[in-house]
Image (spheres, rainbow, N blue to C red):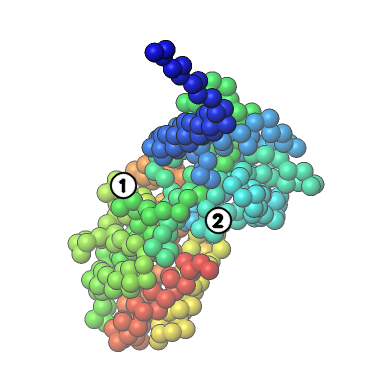
Amino acid sequence: MAKKKRKMRKIRWKNVIIALIALGLTIYLLSWVIGLVKGLFKPKDTSGFTACNLTNAKLSEKFTDKEYQGWIEMSDYVFYGENLTFYTETYTPDVANAFVGKTLVLVDVCTGNEIVLDKVEDRLDGQFDVSTIPAGFYEVYMEENLVRKRLYTNNKFETDDEPFYTVTRNGMNKKIEVFADKALLNKDTATEDVLKDHFVFINVTEEVAPEGYYDIMLNPGPLGITNTESATGNGVTEASELYQFAVKVKNGLEEKGYRVALSRDGGEALSTYGEGGTVAAGFDKQVKYLIDFGMYEASAKAGGMYVTYSSYVKNTLAKSIYDAISEGTPLTGTDLSKSARRGVYDSDFDIREAGGLALGAGTYSDAEKVNEFAATNRHGMECVCVEFINTKNATDAQNWLNNTDLIVEKTVEGIAAALARE
């Protein structure tokens, strides 16, 4: 028998095409999933400086070929309390500053929002209260005759070894960094500078300050360069009374969320000067505000409270303390005044030396050379000196002894009111 011929199956091209399309889609989807998974586990590029949740490369794109209307040199800056001041010349307390009377502008690279300061004043609190600047990465300009000039420096400014943090508010701090480095935005990622010069930037981030950073330091007297002699009289001894008082004020401020240190731990009062003194302790703790508590001896006819502050700032903190105590307790407010000046220096040594570079610490005379460590410190402490009573005045002494807890309460209120921010 002859073999039957097999019938050739007809190829169904329609099915083939559908199968090929399905295979292609499967391969495409598989590669997409693999890419997605790789992306999830790929380390984020954090090389170089970053801000605005952008990588250094993306941030650099914002400045590629950017042009400015003009430039103006910034030569120095200082912090005092929570205030940041820029200078056109290397800083000394008597330096002329071309920014005075002009308008300074911060422009947030992240959002485009602006902070405008009209007619900058010639004070250490006449420019930027950094506690009020929202988180962001800011360019700095001076505006004159409707022309905005970009601040730059001739030489690269290194960021401070110890970062500056504002006072603790609602459990958080703001970290303030000042940069002037033309390689800032392409460091370790490119061979060519994006920035045309060492332009000045301020970077503000919200975070919790590291341990060891304090907002306020309370310095219970006796107050003096050697701090060895207590004012006494009418049952009051300055050293013991004010230490116990300071501990209570510390507790009250800590209940409000502030980080508070004491200059001494129950022992003898510290000298203002030297590596082991009050000023050194404040700088070691990165303190922003130093509050001196003292008493004095004078004629029994004299009396009342004296509060003194630096001649280079407004009396905001000092007045808040003075008013709270003099209006809320039996203590009489006798005088609220700025420190007298000797030449360009505040004559009150605690105020002057606590100010670091901002107030010429370590340079007033040969005696201050032991504070040379403070002379170049840009993070000056704003100091207020409160002398509560004349221990030789019987009325003052009784008002103190009978109302100590009330004076504590009002002192806490005065400090906290001045440091509060909306």
Q: Residues within 10 Å of mark 2 (few under 14, many from 20)?
A: some
Q: Is residue 138 above or below residue 11?
A: below
Q: Position of residue 23 (x, y in %)?
A: 48, 31
Q: Pointer 1: what residue?
A: 274
For the N terminus, give its image quadrant.
Answer: top left
Query: Which element carries disc 1, helix, strand or loop?
Result: loop
- Residue 10 got which mark? none
Q: Position of residue 331 (x, y in %)?
A: 40, 83
Q: Nearer the viewer, residue 343 or 68?
A: 68
Residue drawn 50% across the image and 34% down it: 22
Q: Is residue 333 above or below residue 266?
A: below
Q: Position of residue 194 (x, y in %)?
A: 60, 28
Q: Amino acid at mark 2?
A: Ile
Q: Nearer the viewer, residue 373 or 251?
A: 251
Determine the residue located farthest toward the left in the rendered image.
267
Q: Toward which corner of the image does residue 126 lie, by quadrant?
A: bottom right
Q: Pointer 2: what residue?
A: 133
Q: Is residue 35 left or right of residue 267?
A: right
Residue drawn 57% across the image and 27% down it: 13
The numbered mark, 1 or 2, whose residue comes first in the sequence reads 2
Residue drawn 70% across the image and 55% down it: 119
Q: Position of residue 340 (x, y in %)?
A: 52, 60
Q: Is residue 89 left or right of residue 49?
A: right
Q: Amino acid at mark 1?
A: Gly
Q: Report, in whole angstroms, how far the alpha carbon at label 1 lies from the one at label 2.
A: 35 Å
